[in-house]
């Protein structure tokens, strides 16, 4: 089973050369080089050139590389897609997606610019319209690999307030997850904004993991370790998963259709989940900390 870790996914301002250079050394599973919210309008073209140059230079090691472009309705979106189609990124992140048509338009623009089939699309779901369209968006393109929660914009559009338990976005997060899993996609949780609130960050990461997200998007390197801990399988969790796999295999070899582990009935669905957990742990271990 092939599983790609996406525990920690750090936004990196595309206009900040120093931040991009530092990102090459960070223990993040993935980076989103940002041309949208993190870049002022006057710096958009310069940031695009800097990101393309950074991708060509490489040196990011195991880190999955995505680039968040500006929307096609903006003055920069079409040029972003044309420049990134063959720049060497693993994925292009589309902001504020609200319809299948937007995905198709971006897909067509990338294809026209010669994008390889391996270039994935990630769609950000960060508006009420986007949440309600998430199920259709998730099935819009074979390039689509991931749905990303944009909780900051969503809270604003809902007219809600940020609360410690995130009650204001739980319905939206659930719908996003349902859409992603139904389409076989990865799903990333939204950012934690208060960088001084370490306990809140830990709680938000645990909640995201409990809900079923693959990882968390982040806005500062200091938050990477917390996300990596929360979204990685724990020792006891792995030990139980290996017991489940072994017990089920022994039962099958003995011609038994039912097996009980630690007092609980184990079925094929539990074995599949256990195997994925072990595969994730092995993929994380294989890359090592901050591998260059």
Image (tube, grey):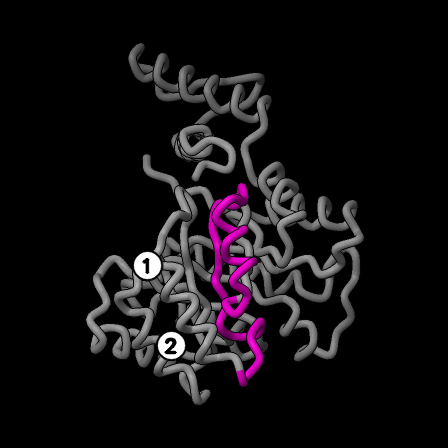
> Dividing the image into 4 quarters, which one contains the C terminus?
top left
Residue 193 picture location, percent across and down? 71, 61
Q: Taking 155 as reference, is 286 left or right?
A: left
Residue 52 picture location, percent across and down? 37, 66
Is residue 15 highlighted in magenta?
yes
| Vertical order, 50 against 205 (above or below) | below
> Which residue is at the front of the view, 247 or 27?
27
Q: Taking 63 as reference, is 221 left or right?
A: right
**What residue would you read off at disc 1?**
56
Q: What residue appears at the point 62 percent right and 39 percent down from the top-left corner?
A: 230
Q: What stretch is highlighted in magenta?
A: 14-42
Q: What residue appears at the point 79 percent right and 51 percent down from the top-left corner?
A: 197
| Vertical order, 3 against 65 (above or below) | above
For label 2, the crowd category at 10 Å Cα-Cα, with few meaning under 14, some 14 to 19 and many 20 or more, is many
Residue 49 picture location, percent across and down? 40, 72
Q: Taking 26 as reference, is 158 left or right?
A: right
């Amino acid at each position: 089973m092939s599983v790609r870790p996406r525990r920690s996914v750090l936004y990196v301002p595309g206009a900040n050369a120093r931040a991009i250079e530092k990102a090459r050394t960070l223990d993040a599973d993935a980076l989103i080089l940002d041309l949208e919210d993190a870049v002022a309008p006057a710096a958009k073209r310069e940031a695009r050139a800097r990101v393309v140059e950074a991708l060509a230079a490489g040196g990011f090691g195991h880190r999955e590389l995505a680039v968040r472009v500006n929307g096609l309705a903006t003055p920069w979106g079409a040029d972003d897609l044309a420049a990134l189609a063959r720049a060497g990124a693993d994925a292009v992140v589309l902001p504020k997606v609200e319809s299948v048509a937007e995905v198709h338009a971006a897909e067509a623009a990338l294809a026209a610019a010669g994008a390889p089939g391996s270039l994935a699309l990630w769609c950000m779901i960060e508006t009420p319209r986007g949440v309600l369209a998430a199920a259709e968006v998730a099935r819009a393109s074979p390039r689509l690999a991931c749905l990303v929660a944009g909780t900051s914009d969503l809270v604003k559009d809902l007219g809600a307030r940020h609360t410690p338990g995130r009650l204001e976005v739980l319905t939206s997060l659930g719908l996003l997850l349902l859409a992603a899993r139904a389409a076989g996609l990865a799903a990333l949780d939204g950012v934690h904004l208060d960088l001084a609130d370490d306990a809140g960050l830990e709680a938000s990461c645990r909640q995201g993991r409990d809900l079923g997200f693959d990882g968390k998007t982040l806005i500062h390197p200091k938050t990477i370790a917390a996300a990596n801990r929360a979204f990685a399988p724990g020792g006891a969790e792995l030990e139980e998963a290996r017991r489940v796999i072994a017990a089920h295999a022994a039962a099958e070899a003995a011609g038994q259709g039912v097996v009980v582990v630690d007092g609980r009935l184990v079925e094929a669905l539990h074995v599949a989940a256990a195997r994925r957990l072990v595969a994730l742990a092995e993929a994380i271990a294989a890359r090592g900390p901050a591998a260059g």
